[in-house]
Amino acid sequence: MLAQIMLQGLPETVSLTLVAIVLTGTRLPAVKFLFLVLFMLALVGILRSLPLTFGFHLLVGIAGLGLGLAFLTRTPIARTMLSSASAYLILLTFEVSIHLVLTNVLGIKVDDIIDKNWLWIIMGWPQIIAMFFTAYLLRKKDITIKI
C-alpha cells in the first residue's frame, strides 16, 4: 500500500496538480504546491478506501483541486474548477488510452493489473510521464484557461 502511494499515487498527484496549475496560468510556491499535493493525495486516498460508488473520488478530487487552487492562488474559482476538471480529463484520457494499448500489446488482463500492485505501479508510469510532458508543453506554448 505504501509503495503504491509513494511510487504511483504521489507522482500521479504531482503531475495532475502541475497540469491544473499550468492551465490556470498561475504559479505556486513550492511549499504551497507540496501542501496542495499532499492534501489531494490524502483526500483521494481516504475516499478510495471507503465503500463509495465508483467515480465518487473523481468528483470530489476535481472539486478539491479546484477549490484548493482558488484558495492558494487567489484565482477565480470558475477558472480553477475548469482547470481542475480539464487536468482530470487529460489524465483520464491518458490512463484509458495507455492501459488499452498496453493490455492489448502485452496481452495482460485487467484483473491481473488490479491484483498485482507492482504491475499497477508500472502501468501507471506512462501516463504520469505523459502528464509531466503535457504540463511542460502547456507552459511552453502558454496555453491556459481564460475565464
Image (tube, rainbow, N blue to C red):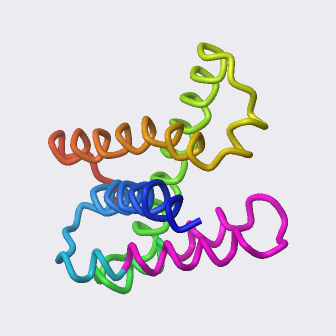
- The N terminus: image quadrant: bottom right
Q: Nearer the viewer, residue 74 or 33?
A: 33
**Residue at 75% from the left image edge and 27% from the top image edge:** 109
- Judge whether residue 147 can be spotted in this image: no
Residue 111: x percent and y percent?
78, 37
Dividing the picture into quadrants, the one containing residue 6 is bottom left
Q: Residue furthest top?
A: 105
Residue 50: x percent and y percent?
78, 76
Position above or below: 131 against 103:
below
Region of the chain picked out in magenta, as a range: 36-64
**Residue at 19% from the left image edge and 69% from the top image edge:** 27
**Residue at 60% from the left image edge and 72% from the top image edge:** 45
Dividing the picture into quadrants, the one containing residue 97 is top right
Position above or below: 10 against 76:
above
Residue 132: x percent and y percent?
30, 46
> In the image, is 30 to the left or to the right of 110?
left
> In the image, is 80 to the left or to the right of 60?
left
Residue 84: x percent and y percent?
47, 62
Marker count (numbered): 0
- Judge whether residue 14 can be spotted in this image: yes
SS assignment for the magenta stretch, majority? helix
Q: Nearer the viewer, residue 111 or 146?
A: 111
Dividing the picture into quadrants, the one containing residue 33 is bottom left
